[in-house]
Image (cartoon, rainbow, N blue to C red):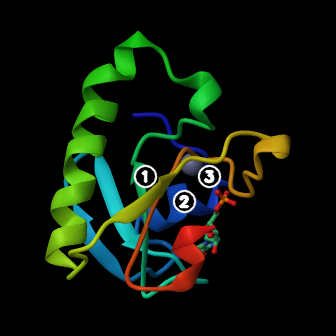
Amino acid sequence: MSTDPNCIFCKIAAGQIPSRKVYEDEEILVFHDIHPWAPVHVLMVPKAHIPSMVEVGPEHAPLLGKMMALGPRLMRELGVSNGFRTIVNTGADGGQEVGHLHIHFIGGPRPWAKG
Ligand code: 5GP
Ligand code: ZN
């Protein structure tokens, strides 16, 4: 599995930087965002270093499918019962700040969700 020693999410996946973990298996990690935008805001990452959605290829389809199916289950377990947002920022103009593919799952009652 490819990792990048300078990547903050690779370090979190390796346990070198602490995080509040929600879920972990051999290829996926989910942890609370350090600056949550809402009552529940978690980040789901592949443990392999995939820089962004641009680098996703057909070989990643099973992994990404697993990630999309896992998100709703975890949000339900985190007490989110009335919907949530799912965001993937890609590249500089896409607002991506961390260069390791991640899916934001953001939920809980707040007016911002309308915007
Ligand atoms: P992006 O803008 O790249 O889509 O989102 C990166 C997210 O990672 C931001 O919401 C930011 O708060 C979060 N983040 C950045 N560094 C850390 C960290 O060290 N730990 C955790 N838990 N979240 C982080
Ligand atoms: Zn990485």
Seen in the image, is 89 located left or right of residue 32? right
Q: Residue at x 22, y 38 (%)?
A: 66
- Decide if ligand 2 comes within 8 Å of the CB at mark 2: yes
Q: Quadrant of the C terminus?
A: bottom right
> Circle 2 is placed at which residue position?
9
> Circle 3 is placed at which residue position?
5
Return the residue found at the far top: 58
Above/below status of 58 relative to 5: above
Q: Are marks 2 and 1 in contact (CB under 8 Å)?
A: yes
Seen in the image, is 113 located left or right of residue 60? right
What residue type is disc 2 on?
Answer: Phe
Q: Position of residue 24 (x, y in %)?
A: 23, 61
- Decide if ligand 2 comes within 8 Å of the CB at mark 1: yes
Determine crowd level at label 3: few under 14, some 14-19, many 20+ residues with C-alpha closer than 10 A: few
What residue type is disc 3 on?
Answer: Pro
| Tally of numbered tags | 3
Return the residue found at the far right: 93
What residue type is disc 1 on?
Answer: Val
Could you tell me how far apart the alpha carbons at marks 2 and 3 are, in whole angstroms?
Answer: 10 Å
Q: Is residue 111 visible?
A: yes
Determine crowd level at label 1: few under 14, some 14-19, many 20+ residues with C-alpha closer than 10 A: many
Above/below status of 46 relative to 12: above
> Which dot, 1 or 3, sits closer to the camera?
1
Q: Position of residue 29 (x, y in %)?
A: 33, 59
Q: Position of residue 97 (x, y in %)?
A: 75, 57
Above/below status of 56 relative to 108: above
Q: Quadrant of the N terminus?
A: top left
Could you tell me how far apart the alpha carbons at marks 1 and 3 are, in whole angstroms?
Answer: 16 Å
- Pointer 2 or 1: first along the chain: 2
Depth check: 18 or 101 in front?
A: 101
